[in-house]
Image: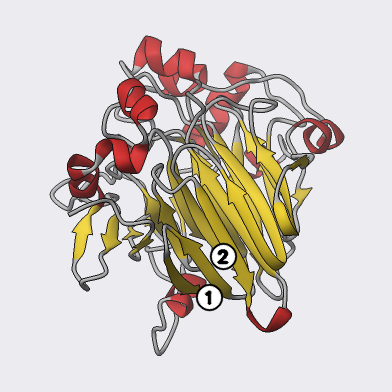
Amino acid sequence: MKTAPFYKLAPNRVWRTYLGGRNLDAIEGKAAPEDSHFPEDWILSTTLASNVGRESIREGISSVLLQTGETIPLPRLLDAFPDGILGEEHRKKYGKKTAFLLKFLDSSIRLHLQCHPTVAFAQKFLNSPSGKSEGYYILGIRPGCEGYIYLGFQNPPAPEEFRRMIEEQDISAMLACFEKIPVRPGDAFYVPGGFPHAIGEGVFMIELMEPTDFAVRIEFERGGCLLPEKARFMNRGIDFAISMFDFQKRSAEAIRNNQFVHPLPLPVEGAAERESLFDRRSTNCFRAERIVVHGDAAVRQKGFRVLIVTQGSGTLEAGGESCELKQYDRILIPAASEEIRFRPRHSHTMEVVAALPPEV
């Protein structure tokens, strides 16, 4: 058996403390899509989810669909073909791991006010080589919803006042530390570790991040779910939680100027536009590109990547094989498949987001 030129990735829903997922139910073809505590689909993951009270359920690890119809865990595929899938250079640096985590996230309510560690914080206090910086690509906003995020403190509190807010669960005071940052489909923005943030209700997006599930949540209840104490501050104290936060004042304008991505054109062959979204300009932890295909087009690239069809439909060709693509399909392209070709259906436009690991 040899490495296939591409693999479809299976749905991989993960339990979370907030509500959402109706769009994900619809993508999976469920008869009655509804919101639940499964608002995320971990598309590409070799990371276990951290859900207090659900430790016996090994959630988070992705699976791939083989051409035989069999579904196997992603780590099994990586064990069988580490260099063919990941590439030799990647495998030498990161082992048989993807080195980043890729999700769909579909919120029906605003998420908890929270924070993730920087790499330096994770190395010092969590014995981890990775923190949890994130990149968001907005796919849609639900009808009737505003479309916003909270990101960074626009009105930073003094640390002692912040402690009081957390201890007393003074949510209105916490929210007063932020201004809503409007988002719309097609927006991409980078969330560094240490930045306080929360995704607003009704946001459907692609999320790239470092390969951990580290989070400090300073808001203990959302959607009728009261966080166990161990799930609030990663089973640590409030001083640990507060020390993770970056208290620098950042205006809404500064957030839009500095954290929202300005696409950078990339080479492509044929009738398409290709642009970099996340790259070394913002982070060394993951990469992403957007490809808008109008006709026959080809992309050459070293290393593995995951393709997500965000608009339209068409055909993918690689390694002498082809498959039909429809909206929200997710395809793992191994490192061995350096050239891939696209053809949109019926001369319509197809948009694809490609998610990639850190450069090696």
Residue farthest to the bottom, as pictured = 31
* Left or right for 2, reference 110: left
Residue placed most toward the observer, 100 or 8: 8
Residue 200 in view (yes/no): no
Residue placed most toward the observer, 49 or 251: 49
| Residue beneath disc 1 | 326
| Residue beneath disc 2 | 309
For the point 57% across and 60% down, which residue is it? 341
Give the secondary structure at mark 2.
strand
Give the secondary structure at mark 1.
loop
- Please, what is the three-letter code of the amino acid marked with disc 1? Lys
For the point 66% across and 56% down, which residue is it? 138
Coloration of the structure image: secondary structure
Residue 113 in view (yes/no): yes
Q: Are marks 2 and 1 in contact (CB under 8 Å)?
A: yes
The percent position of residue 12, horizontal first and vertical second, equals: 33, 61
* Left or right for 13, reference 52: right
